[in-house]
Image (cartoon, rainbow, N blue to C red):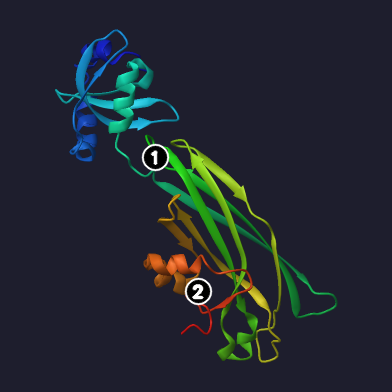
Amino acid sequence: MISSPLLLIRRLRTVPRLLLLATVFFAASLLASPIEVANKAGQTMAVEVLSYTASSGNVRIRRGDGQIFNTKIDAFDAASQERIIANAPKEVAKFEMDVSVGKKRRDQASSTFMENMTITTSVKITNLTRDNDLGETNFTILLVARNSRRYADRSQDWYRILSVQKFSTQLPAGKFSEHELKPVATSYDSDKDSSNLGGWEFEGYLLVAQDPAGKILATKTTLGQVLTTTVKEEKRVLDALKLGEGMETEHDLTPRGSR
């Protein structure tokens, strides 16, 4: 760990790997403007701030001669720390959303065709970036069922919103969080023929991530038409987020009867 940028720059001058670092980060910092900073001893230099990670205090800076190194923000005086934070690139952390769905079935009473299903869902959010913390991010997941009556009558093929659940998280660089959601129950006729009496069989989900202002950051879905149409337009995703539990929709999550 580098504790003093000014003391260690001379030691880093001969390290060839710095040339690679300079190449890697050059494109990301073309628009960065140099600022003057000082360490706590009052020594000054002009640098470009390439990244700042609030959770760890790590700072990556480039000096005027192109050399890049890492240090801690507390190596600088208070005024310099403020300038570093203000001039650090404001990039949205890249993150990954993993959804795990469990479906437990059991026969309904003495029936051989009606089934009860309990759906359990967990979501793992992983911050994939090394330098950027993931700020407060809001997540909404819609669990969707499909009318099993479609096996007897193809005209009765539509969706129903089983559950709408929300959670929020913020993650330091490289960290993850896991979220267990409330179990959801449904029932349906499992016979896939003209005798089907109907019911609601779990079909899939739509998971949406938003920033605090409501902007869509990411989506993930297992619903075919939602994947090919709905998630390609932010307005349609925002409309889908207005759906309530029990509402019936078309396969693109447009409310039934709205067309």
Residue 45: name its quadrant: top left
Q: Is residue 65 shown above or below 119?
A: above
Q: Residue at x 35, y 16 (%)?
A: 75
Q: Residue 20: image x %, image y %?
A: 22, 31
6 left or right, relative to 125: left
Dot 1 alpha-carbon crowd within 10 angstroms: few under 14, some 14 to 19, many 20 or more: some
> Which residue is the site of mark 1?
129
Q: Residue 78: image x %, image y %?
A: 35, 18
Give the residue type that dot 2 points to: Leu
- Give the residue at the far top of this rendering: 41
Q: Residue 64: image x %, image y %?
A: 15, 23
Q: Residue at x 66, y 76 (%)?
A: 200
State how many labels appear: 2
Q: Residue 224: image x %, image y %?
A: 47, 72
In depth, the one of 104 and 125 nearer the eye is: 125
Dot 2: what SS?
loop
Q: Residue at x 40, y 25 (%)?
A: 57
Q: Is residue 87 shown above or below 116?
A: above
Dot 2 alpha-carbon crowd within 10 angstroms: few under 14, some 14 to 19, many 20 or more: many
- Give the residue at the far left of this rendering: 65
Give the residue type that dot 1 points to: Thr
Q: Is residue 81 shown above or below 225?
A: above
> Which residue is the site of mark 2?
253
Residue 1: name its quadrant: top left
Q: Which mark is residue 2?
A: none
Q: Residue at x 40, y 72 (%)?
A: 229
11 left or right, relative to 158: left
180 left or right, relative to 86: right
